[in-house]
Image (spheres, coloured by chain):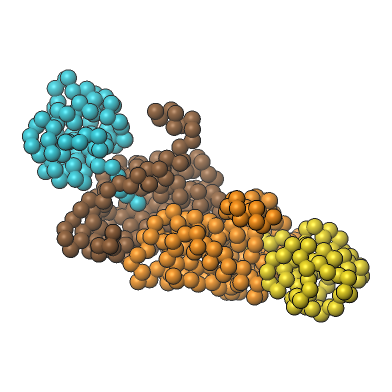
Chain colours: A cyan, B yellow, C orange, D brown
Amino acid sequence: MKLLYFAWVRERVGKAEEQIDPPAGVATIAELMAWLARRGEEYAYAFENPKVIRAAIDRGHVRADAPIRGAREIAFFPPMTGG
Amino acid sequence: MKLLYFAWVRERVGKAEEQIDPPAGVATIAELMAWLARRGEEYAYAFENPKVIRAAIDRGHVRADAPIRGAREIAFFPPMTGG
Amino acid sequence: MATTIRLQREAFDAAAEAARMTHGRGEVGAVVTFTGLCRGEENGEPIVALMLEHYPGMAEAEIARHVEEARARWPLLGVTVVHRFGRIVPGEAIVLVATASRHRHAAFAAAAFLMDYLKTRAPFWKQVETAAGEVWVEAKAADDAAAERWSAPPRREAAK
Amino acid sequence: MATTIRLQREAFDAAAEAARMTHGRGEVGAVVTFTGLCRGEENGEPIVALMLEHYPGMAEAEIARHVEEARARWPLLGVTVVHRFGRIVPGEAIVLVATASRHRHAAFAAAAFLMDYLKTRAPFWKQVETAAGEVWVEAKAADDAAAERWSAPPRREAAK
């Protein structure tokens, strides 16, 4: 699946997007964040406080307990500050 | 004192303004309307339902029980429909 | 604060009025404009024109008083009110209220407040001209109710 | 209904956008515009520029969804949303929401509703550039509260 990062999540991870293939045990957004946080110090830094990070699956807002199965595109970002 | 009439009050009275000198017993806006209504059929028509007529003394909204003593300019008009 | 209040027979340019209000003012973060237009029909009846009568002198004073009240209630950086009188044809603007503030809530609230008051307290009267003749527009209870919502309980008591 | 939703890097002309929305539409009696501007300072610190990042594709979809919700809630005759991204300097507009309706309450409410949602749900992120460097703008609890007021009790329950 494709991951996208925005704003300071993007800056901390050090890239705007990437393809990943998480193991089968990673079933929800929260579990995906925990798995990502173990991939290296830049990820650990980006996801050090997962409660403040928002997520979207296939361009729709989802909560941390949302299942990621079947997702093509998952995005992580801080709370929005548009308008 | 000077009287001004607006909208359908003006149309019914048949004039936009006039100078009047009501007798001393006419002390309030309500009493002035009652006095005017006795001045002729055009006035009787204009003031036939005084409850719907609004008044201003010296360009400030007042209620029917407002005293008219000292007023230089009194206006009568229907409820406002601006904006 | 930049305040403009104008009554005029001529059409106005809402955008130019709003731009003048904020020009060179770096603190402004939010601008709300309300434009009231003459519709082409009323209750299914085509309108030829609106004729707006006003009470010169009192209209300006009433609007100025409500602009002052808006300034006292919200932290405004600019207020513009332009109200036309005379003959207005469908599609033309009748009234403009524009408000500027640092943040959006003050700008939205002040513009809505001023419109509610203009509708019910400013001495203007609309006459509709249709093919069948002229008729005065009746005041709406809904407009009175809208204006009433801005009366805080203590002020409402005092007014009674 | 005339609906325009546009995300763009370029500056826009708020007046031209509002005029396009109502052109030749005789039923429109009320037009409300909200323009959000880049202020010249934030917390007393002069701002050099704002940099707006967005999520292409999702941003358009989120805005369109909220425009549909506004149309379902109020009898609108036109909605225009233009949101910029990229670098924006003080005094420039960031966002425009314009709404048209027969009567003012629908136009005011829909514009305020759309702005509250854009602030909290549309995937845009602001970074402030000052002489000292760049810093991401933090989301405000007040904006969340403002958006929350549009959640009717049954819908709020369903979302939990």
For this view, does D134 lie left or right of residue C97? left
For this view, does C94 lie left or right of residue B52? left
Residue C34: image location, x then y, percent: 51, 60
Q: Residue furthest left?
A: A40
Residue at the image position 35 percent from the left and 71 percent from the top: C24
Judge by depth and name the residue closer to the eye, D114 or C158.
C158
Residue D122: image location, x then y, percent: 33, 44
For this view, does C68 lie left or right of residue A22? right
Residue D143: image location, x then y, percent: 37, 46
Residue A69: image location, x then y, percent: 24, 23
Relative to D83, residue B56 above or below: below
**Count of picture labels:** 0
Judge by depth and name the residue closer to the eye, C13 or C140.
C140
Relative to D34, residue C77 above or below: below
Name the quadrant containing residue D145: top left
Residue at the image position 80 percent from the left and 66 percent from the top: B29
Residue at the image position 74 percent from the left and 62 percent from the top: B63
Is residue C98 shown to the viewer in this render?
no
Judge by depth and name the residue closer to the eye, C64 or A4.
C64
Name the quadrant containing residue C1: bottom left
Residue at the image position 66 percent from the left and 66 percent from the top: C124
Name the quadrant containing residue D157: top left
Relative to C67, residue D65 above or below: above
Judge by depth and name the residue closer to the eye, B25 or D100.
B25
Task: State which quarter of the image contains the C terminus of chain B.
Answer: bottom right
For this view, does D113 lie left or right of residue C56? left
Is residue B19 shown to the viewer in this render?
yes
Task: State which quarter of the image contains the N terminus of chain B.
Answer: bottom right
